[in-house]
Amino acid sequence: MAATSAIKDLLRTQQIETPSWAYGNSGTRFKVFAQPGVPRTVEEKIDDAAQVHAFTGVAPSVALHIPWDRVADYRKLAEYAESAGVRLGAINANVFQDDDYKLGSVTNPDPKVRRKALDHLLECVDIMDATGSRDLKLWFADGTNYPGQDDIRTRQDRLAEALAAVYERLGEQQRMLLEYKLFEPAFYTTDVPDWGTSYAHCVQLGDKAQVCVDTGHHAPGTNIEFIVAFLLRAGKLGAFDFNSRFYADDDLMVGAADPFQLFRIMYEVVRGGGYDPAAGVAFMLDQCHNIEAKIPGQIRSVCNVQEATAKALLVDRAALAEAQDSGDVLAANDVFMDAFHTDVRPLLAELRTELGLDPDPVAAYRRSGYQERIVAERIGGSQAGWGA
């Protein structure tokens, strides 16, 4: 078992990126729910993200979604973020909310629509140049609803062509993160439905293309930690989008549905060297806080990832290896369960105190008065949201 000091040392280096869209209004496909105090501008989203970092100490960056977060001057926006105490992180492209993309974006049968989608992806790389962002995150809603609607293989050719064009445009220090999703909104075929499809395209593209694992994008019962272990072994795990699911892509707070699964995933991250800076794994949240308050929801999620990481670090690797090598199934499982059942909240409270933070970030935020202030001040204008 790692010493407490060694566990704290790694936890001090942990960084978890929050998404700008998590601070806006969201809901289900039936209704978007408005909340008082929701940001009206991308700058106000950054202000809220800065609060999460201020109270947790481990959320120093905020991801942008284009065009939701489009501004005239991205260099100026990056300077604003720095003045607020955070930095701009991954740039997320949006090729799924335009009427032209009804039959797909980069895989659309119409070459004009494909060109429009590609131009947007290239625009996002331009934005990365201005913000200093390393990662371009790509998720495609492309797919079909009916057998025979389009040619499955041809759509893969179109996808590969677009990805190659974007890859060629990337700078030396920039990366492409290819996300996948089992289904929705396409119901018959999805053009990037699983980690294997994403992995195959990334391998073909090269070292600057990596897989993004969204923990809510799998079929029920999928062993996500196996995917994580495989991709780390292959050097192709680029990022996580952390959230929780009960049924489909619920985008709930990470760890809410299955804390044990989150622990198992984080163990494979630790085991596979995913926290080594050379591995380059980005730890991001991708959530929609539909009924809970936005900022406390993000703080809670960050804390949940911290707790799962601390428990993963507590696994007695030597005892585990001994039990595994001897074929002692129960002993090996006991090592895992002992770490999972350990209450790491006192350790994290102690670490936060050492860092000059309140040991209870959610309670500290509630006492800060920030929520009451933004509710009072953010009157008028158009609230941010994903507009469904």
Image: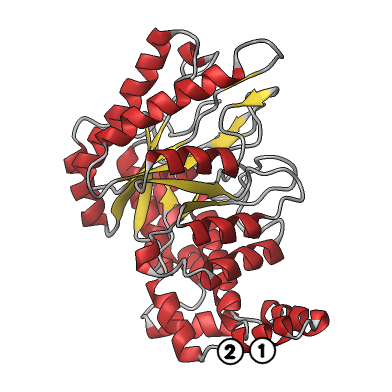
Q: CA distance from mark 2 to mark 1?
A: 8 Å
Q: Quadrant of the C terminus?
A: top right
Q: Are marks 2 and 1 in contact (CB under 8 Å)?
A: yes
User: How many residues crowd mark 2 within 10 Å: few (<14), some (14–19), many (20+)?
Assistant: some
Q: Which residue is mark 1?
A: 319
Q: Position of residue 371 (x, y in %)?
A: 45, 54
| Residue 1 numbered mark, or none | 2
- In depth, the one of 174 and 46 nearer the eye is 174
Please report the residue visible at 18 percent of the width from the left and 49 percent of the height from the top.
Answer: 79
Eyeballing the image, is 134 above or below 261?
A: above
Please report the residue visible at 33 percent of the width from the left and 39 percent of the height from the top.
Answer: 42
User: How many residues crowd mark 1 within 10 Å: few (<14), some (14–19), many (20+)?
Assistant: some
- What element does badge 1 sit on? helix
- In depth, the one of 388 and 310 nearer the eye is 310
- What element does badge 2 sit on? loop
Please report the residue visible at 46 percent of the width from the left and 52 percent of the height from the top.
Answer: 236
- Do we see residue 55 in this rendering? yes
